[in-house]
Amino acid sequence: AIDIQFSSHAHIFQEAHVDVSNCSFINHFASRGSAITLVSDSYFTFGNKTINLDIRKTKFVDCKCKTEGGAVFVSRYTKLFVQDVTFTFNLPDDDHDMTQAFVRGLFIYSLAQLVIIEKSKFFYRYHASYSSPSLLHIKFSSFKPDTRILILYENYLFCPIWYHAETKMQFENQTSLISFRSFCKPCVNDMFSLHSKFVIEFEGSVQNQSQLCYVCPFGGYCANGLLSSKPNFWGLVTSTGHIKFYQCPTGYCSKSKNPYLSSSALQSCFNKRDGVL
């Protein structure tokens, strides 16, 4: 792990740069920023100079923390640049680590005054009975509006199947961004999602909106974002990417002890037919 802290005795006369490239951080754990921590404050700078953290072509896998920034934590009076980086969190279902539900910024927690993240991928693969923590958590509240810069370009968030992506933003005077947070959340009951890949982009006040859950179709059973066919129904994905169910003839399908099959079972009739051909 990389832990960088500028003490009160440091005087920065020019822009300081910390470059991290072509690295892998796997299974780290800390109170905050388990893989990379960059801490500075106004007393550590001279002439409004900042500490710049540049992360490129690097992988973070299952990096956890107790409070903020599972993989990366960046304090105020810094600038953060992230390009072509992959973040993955894929703990198994039997790892009941509830502390991660309350983490702010499971991948990145940033208080930097400038954040640019581009061409990066975020994989959240943890199916849980609770909503996920914020995955990207970016705050600007301690800076003047004209110094807050956030650019997100060509980034992808991959949520578990049947989840949807959700972004929450807070503005000051309806124009100046204060905070930006991204989540993966399961669809509510009677809703489902076919998508797992979502574009995460932001520049100024423009943000990509592709995060949708759909009403459960007739013949389908939806719970906790999961979709399966009801007994005696056949489901298929249409050419337009939607799911449609058809009712099978009476007695055509064998009865199952579990009437609602697994989340991938759209075809309850498949291989469960009775009778003589």
Image (cartoon, helix red, strand yellow):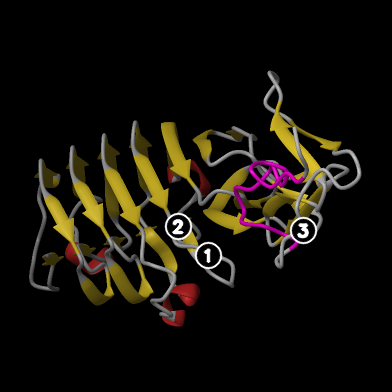
Residue 90 spot, x, y in % from top left: 36, 59
Which residues make up the magenta segment? Answer: 259-274
Residue 105 spot, x, y in % from top left: 42, 62
Residue at (53, 42) in percent of width and height: 196
Q: Quadrant of residue 26?
A: bottom left
Q: Quadrant of residue 58?
A: top left
Q: Is residue 111 visible in the rendered structure shown here?
A: yes
Residue at (43, 54) in percent of width and height: 124
Magenta-span inclusion, residue 263: yes
Residue 62 spot, x, y in % from top left: 28, 62
Residue at (69, 47) in percent of width and height: 272
Residue named by callout 3: 255
- Left or right, 228 with respect to 246, comes to left
Residue named by callout 2: 135
Please state which amino acid type lies under the numbered disc 3.
Lys
Residue placed most toward the observer, 233 or 195:
233
- Residue at the outermost front position: 276
Q: Quadrant of the C terminus?
A: top right
Residue placed most toward the observer, 201 or 13:
201
Number of numbered callouts drawn: 3
Residue 264 spot, x, y in % from top left: 60, 48
Vertical arrangement, residue 130 with respect to residue 205, above or below: below
Q: Is residue 180 visible in the rendered structure shown here?
A: no
Q: Quadrant of residue 155?
A: top left
